[in-house]
Image (cartoon, coloured by chain):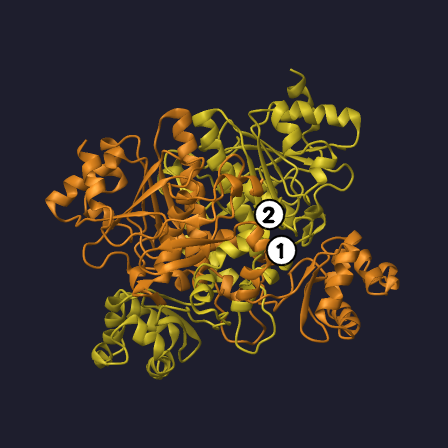
Chain colours: A yellow, B orange
Amino acid sequence: MAAEQTAAGTSAADKQAGPLSGITVVDLSRILAGPYCTLMMAELGARVIKVETPGTGDDARHYGPFVNGKSAYFQSVNRGKQSIALNLKDDGDRATFEKLLAKADVIVENFRPGTMEKLGYGWEDLHPKYPKLIYASASGFGHSGPEMKRPAYDMVVQGMGGIMSITGHEGSPPTRIGTSIGDIGAGLFTAIGVMSALFGRAMTGEARKVDIGMFDCQVALLENAAMRYFVTGKAPGPLGARHPSITPFQAFNTQDGYIIIAAGNDGLFHKMADALGKPEWKTDDRYTTNDLRATHVTELEAEVEAVLKTQPTAHWMTVMDAAGVPAGPINDIGQAVEYPQTAARNMVVTVDDPVTGPMKVVGNPIKISGFPDPTTRLPAPNLDQDRDAILREIEQ
Amino acid sequence: MAAEQTAAGTSAADKQAGPLSGITVVDLSRILAGPYCTLMMAELGARVIKVETPGTGDDARHYGPFVNGKSAYFQSVNRGKQSIALNLKDDGDRATFEKLLAKADVIVENFRPGTMEKLGYGWEDLHPKYPKLIYASASGFGHSGPEMKRPAYDMVVQGMGGIMSITGHEGSPPTRIGTSIGDIGAGLFTAIGVMSALFGRAMTGEARKVDIGMFDCQVALLENAAMRYFVTGKAPGPLGARHPSITPFQAFNTQDGYIIIAAGNDGLFHKMADALGKPEWKTDDRYTTNDLRATHVTELEAEVEAVLKTQPTAHWMTVMDAAGVPAGPINDIGQAVEYPQTAARNMVVTVDDPVTGPMKVVGNPIKISGFPDPTTRLPAPNLDQDRDAILREIEQ
């Protein structure tokens, strides 16, 4: 499928085509959570119009690194979008904004709760006037509850939501998830909410408000850590590089580094035992079920590493591949994006930006049959770049 | 909005209502990536029918901890779904499966590429026979490229996709993200793909294949880490508890622990400086822009901690709240799920399971106006629990 998509879509001179083609998103969001959501929508065919503060624009325009004065950070999350600068406290600009809303399907914002209401653009104001407009909000703590007005950024919800408490090594100082999972998690859940609302609107004609709290999303991502707390009443701690309930499922030392082996069931554990020349593990009373292996994880780890330390990672990758046991190296970012599979899946694409020159950005992980998966993208807009075109259009 | 939802939905005796009400998902997926996607769909109103291997069922049924013999892990991801056990190599069961497909809107699977094709149920087989059926696959490396047949579990793609290389402290051993972001990331992108395809089908009548690679999703989550590599050619390393491009945006030591302060722009930095009694930082040549602060992060960190270490975290939370600077403690899982906002947003809900008794699970972070957000959920099904009802239904 990907091959066919590539063939069909090597030129991305036009707006990307996808299941959301024809949908217009008015995007008031800044920095990351909202913009990541609307990036996904743009990748799936939607037209995204950023409405930015005159003069400064999206804060992310000022985050480094810069290439010829243009923020690469901004480029990576806003390529393929349009921009108009509007002062939502100015009457003329408000009139323009309202004409824009009348033509839009979705509005996305990530202000602190109350900001849109103060501007007269909260859901209660907009819904009666624009009954087809879906309203999506991604705020720190959502639009209800005692903490709804509390400000939040990515790291605040990473810390408060519990994920940092289970990431890292026992006794180590706090560890942030290396990527902005507080923002990106919220962006992904917002995208799911908006798309389900678009489908619902297609079925019933009714538009909805989607209310996402970044903190809620962190709780939703806790998955089995929250479950273990509910069952045991004990907060789980950090586990280094092990899975909490599946064994063996972790990074192991080899002669020259590390290998991850994920033997997620008895069959894979048997294959691993054979591949490491230790068939006796298969019938060892300590290792016959996942639960027993989890109980005896320290002994098992020592026995596995005693074997693995005799050879380098590359050797064991060949052995595990031949045995059909899921395994992998720990790649740095360069190795991950230069991995041949990354290119084969169009997961690195090129923005041909007149300011920066050609610049690489991450591609779209959602491959959908029948739509192109092009290897190029349009650049992120300069502030207010599309004003004239948008004004002409909404006056029609 | 959440309050109104609660009032409307305190009884969840019936299937959850949402924008996907009326949609039927046939779910062949196991463990986490696929089941997390279909959990989100069930939370948004879809009916999800798990089709499981007779005898053993979903591997996750055998993952601990157990409550009265039932897996809490399985419960947390499969509550509210139905189950039928079918042997897809048996002619009678295949006939049943095919009748089920004829009534379904979406099929979700997370087998290794080729498995569905061997069963005669690949996209190319199904699409001509069931032209309205959306096909979603979440596999380790997707359905194309040189590594498509490589097996993967969560930790394998966490390691290969680069996120582990930027998580942790310099010189520390490898650090797994405490939650299964390899699986959950893929589950979220699959959900976005499926919902966009449902919307697309509503517009054009055409069904699509959604092809998700867990590895691709890890690359998509790298966000500014990938961008920094593309711009500088240097793979970024782990940053402990700091943000890579925003300063100050990190965990700081206090007298009795840690506080996270996220001063994401100049205005917030000024408020923080005033709140800490250091107004001179606002005009300090080293700190006037985010870029300068990032360059001088070590000095700034030392200066901030010199102040913060004079008082406990609770004191500084009050100070930061009063100043309007985003800040937070580092909660453990218990503190996160017991936080009053968590309850106010229905982010902990109860499954009334006849086997386990009442059990808490994490709620739905996607709040949509006009639909209930109930505080209870139906239990995860026993293996093959819904066979008779489903058989009666498809014979009609």
Question: Disc 1 versus disc 2: distance between alpha carbons?
Answer: 9 Å
Specify the amino acid type for callout 1: Asp
Q: Nearer the viewer, residue A273 or A201?
A: A201
Chain ID at mark 2: A
Q: Position of residue B105 (x, y in %)?
A: 32, 35
Q: Which residue: 43% across, 78% down? A: A256
Q: Residue furthest top?
A: A396
Taking the view exactly as shown, the residue that stands out farthest to the left is: B91
Camera sees residue A169: yes
Using the image as rendered, state which of residue A350 and residue B22 is in the foreground.
B22
Q: Which labelled disc corresponds to residue A154?
A: 1
Task: Tell me which numbered mark, 1 or 2, is placed earlier along the sequence.
Answer: 2
Q: Nearer the viewer, residue B371 or A266?
A: B371
Numbered disc 1: what chain? A
Q: Which residue is mark 2?
A: A33
Q: Indicate the secondary structure of the residue bearing disc 2.
A: helix
In the rendered view of the protein, which quadrant contains the C terminus of chain B? top left
